[in-house]
Amino acid sequence: MANDLFNSFMTGPDENGRFGEFGGRFVSETLMPLILDLQAEYDKAKDDASFWAEMDDLWEHYVGRPSPLYLAERLTEELGGAKIYMKRDELNHTGAHKINNVLGQIILARRMGKKRIIAETGAGQHGVATATVCAKFGLKCVVYMGAHDVERQAPNVFRMRLLGAEIVPVTSGRGTLKDAMNDALRDWVTNVRDTFYCIGTVAGPHPYPAMVRDFQSIIGKEVRTQMDRAEGRLPDTIIAAIGGGSNAMGLFYPFLDDKEVDIIGVEAGGKGVNAKMEHCASLTGGRPGVLHGNRTYLLQDDDGQILEGFSISAGLDYPGIGPEHAWLHDIGRAKYVSITDKEALAAFQKCCELEGIIPALEPSHALAHVMKIAPELPKDHIICMNMCGRGDKDIFTVAKALGFEMGEFA
């Protein structure tokens, strides 16, 4: 592991919120004071032992951390190559990694005296986590969700409503995550005094990308400890699915300076990375631009207009990626690949059949890439993938994709 900070991959962002040429703050003058207040509060919290004591207590007793590190024996045997471990973050309270970050942001919001929390959500897991923590602390919760995602993620919409959240269906654009984030930012500009915007991924204006990463890095920190206990060494390869990229950055960040560990992020390839942009693979098929307060890789046309991505997975259906991922891509520290809907569905089914685990469609993309590379690797090669969400929310989508009507199973 690197000892010289100047040679470390873990020192960013710089004082301007930049990871190389990516990141930064591209926001209206109205929002700048709120952003600066948030940064000041987070900078103070990072050095406050009582803040982390509260986080550790909630992570353990409310979320259920540490999540298990699971050896997928039948899948390993089936593929006949590398040994496959899954970091079981789908076993967290609310069923995904999202609550790791939400707890931190809402504790900050309470310290700042904010009583109204807004959030955007795609697959609904960030919305559910935000609604859950707001219910625990008695805060008003408003969740912006694309109308298309409201339809395909009905179980999570109902969960949010049970938890007391107000759901705002967003009909602009294609009605997906990008559009939900647009409307959440408009709300924040309008309600600056009492509202805190809880962003669900490692995107947005500085300090959000670094702050969300820091909260999610509990994933990779646990993996380091658990892998040492299980194998006496670090994994050879770590893999995670990427939409905006919070679960991936949470796994990757604690390993960035371990140059012997290969890092692979898996984007949503949709119907295939092609000229029609029927995918959400920003790094594979996009180019740098500015969206939602930061500079990063985006799907855009020749005039810089943001294009509508496509994925069967609501949580990966975003035409951009977190700026730290863009930087890691450009400097070559991490490799980014894409997986199609068809490949993800096959991995979803294989995981159910062999391991008795129903995964979300998001980590099914990561698992599909594991299934591609594991057979070609030696048996002493160790892969760890992040099982970042469970599949309850996706059963209707998967049934439809596989040609079934839910009524057939009654």
Image (cartoon, rainbow, N blue to C red):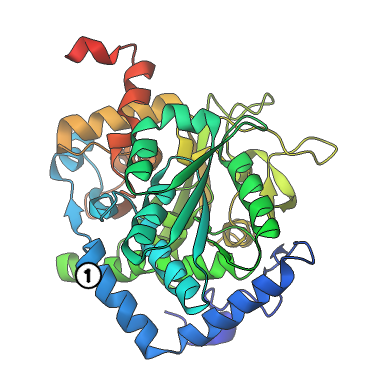
Q: Name which residue lies at 33% across and 49% down.
A: 163
Question: Which residue position is annotated with label 1?
Answer: 60
- Residue 309 lies, with reference to residue 198, above or below; the image says above
Q: Name which residue lies at 36% across and 39% down.
A: 156
Q: Quarter of the image holding residue 342?
A: top left
Q: Quadrant of the C terminus?
A: top left
Q: Quarter of the image holding residue 146?
A: top right
In percent of width and height, residue 173 lies at 67, 32
- Residue 306 lies, with reference to residue 222, above or below; the image says above
Relative side of 167 to 33, left or right: left
**Secondary structure under badge 1?**
helix
In percent of width and height, residue 118 lies at 53, 55
Mark 1 closeness class: few <14, some 14–19, many ≥20 residues within 10 Å: few
Q: Quadrant of the N terminus?
A: bottom left
Three-letter amino acid code at disc 1?
A: Glu
Q: Nearer the viewer, residue 174 or 210?
A: 174
Q: Please identify the residue farthest to the right as the structure is shown.
A: 303
Relative side of 376 to 337, left or right: left
Residue 260 seen in the figure? no
Q: Name which residue lies at 59% across and 32% down.
A: 175
In percent of width and height, residue 121 lies at 49, 45
Q: Nearer the viewer, residue 208 or 342?
A: 208
In percent of width and height, residue 316 lies at 49, 40
- Residue 3 lies, with reference to residue 204, above or below; the image says below
- Residue 130 lies, with reference to residue 409, above or below; the image says below
Q: Name which residue lies at 47% across and 79% down.
A: 111
Relative side of 43 to 187, left or right: left
